[in-house]
Image: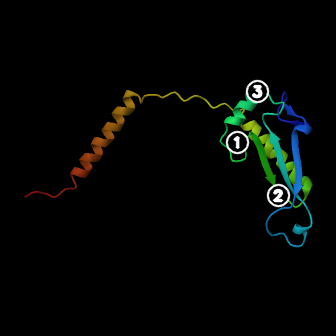
Amino acid sequence: MLEISNSVSIPDNEIEISAIRAQGAGGQNVNKVSSAIHLRFDINASSLPEFYKQRLLSLRDKRITKEGVIVIKAQTFRTQEKNRADAFERLIDVIKQVTVVNKVRRPTKPTRNSQKRRMDSKTKRSKTKALRGRVLE
């Protein structure tokens, strides 16, 4: 059971995990041991609340396929256990990311005093630059 929050959790049978060989340089061990973890989580077939499903499917994330499957490949660590824990943490992060609702930005107008200060500074600057010109004789 993977705990997302106090009220939301994912049963283990909804998460598909497979051990694969890690990519890249790693010496003698890399060709023998399957230490990387390939995690697949189907959003549509999950027991997540509908709100979570809709927000996850609308995310523009390269880890989510067109079919609505989250694919995470964890190969940072040398042991399978650490990579498994890393994959679970990353899945939790993706799901928690959709729970945060951003504040709606309300456009505001600058105050009259701030507009006056801005115009005064522009006037002062233009006078300073005007005085730098050639002196006519």
Few, some or many C-alpha atoms within 10 Å of disc 3 (few <14, some 14-19, many ≥20)? few
Q: Quadrant of the C terminus?
A: bottom left
Few, some or many C-alpha atoms within 10 Å of disc 1 (few <14, some 14-19, many ≥20)? few
Tell whether 65 sits left or right of 9: left
Q: Which amino acid does the dot numbered 3 rest on?
A: Glu
Question: Which residue is situated farthest in the left direction here?
Answer: 137
**Circles 2 and 1 in contact, beta carbons < 8 Å:** no
Residue 50 marker: 3
Picture coordinates of residue 117 (x, y %)? 35, 35
* Residue highlighted by disc 1: 66
- Give the vertical position of 106 relative to 95 (above or below): above
- Please tell me which residue is depicted at 25% across the width and 51% down the height of the picture: 129
Q: Distance between the residues labelled 3 and 2?
A: 31 Å
Mark before the other along the chain sequence, 2 or 1: 1
* Residue highlighted by disc 2: 75
Q: How far apart are marks 2 and 1 (CA)?
A: 24 Å
Q: Which amino acid does the dot numbered 1 rest on?
A: Lys
- Give the vertical position of 89 relative to 106 (above or below): below
- Give the vertical position of 77 relative to 28 (above or below): above
Picture coordinates of residue 27 (x, y %)? 86, 72
Tell whether 9 sits left or right of 136: right
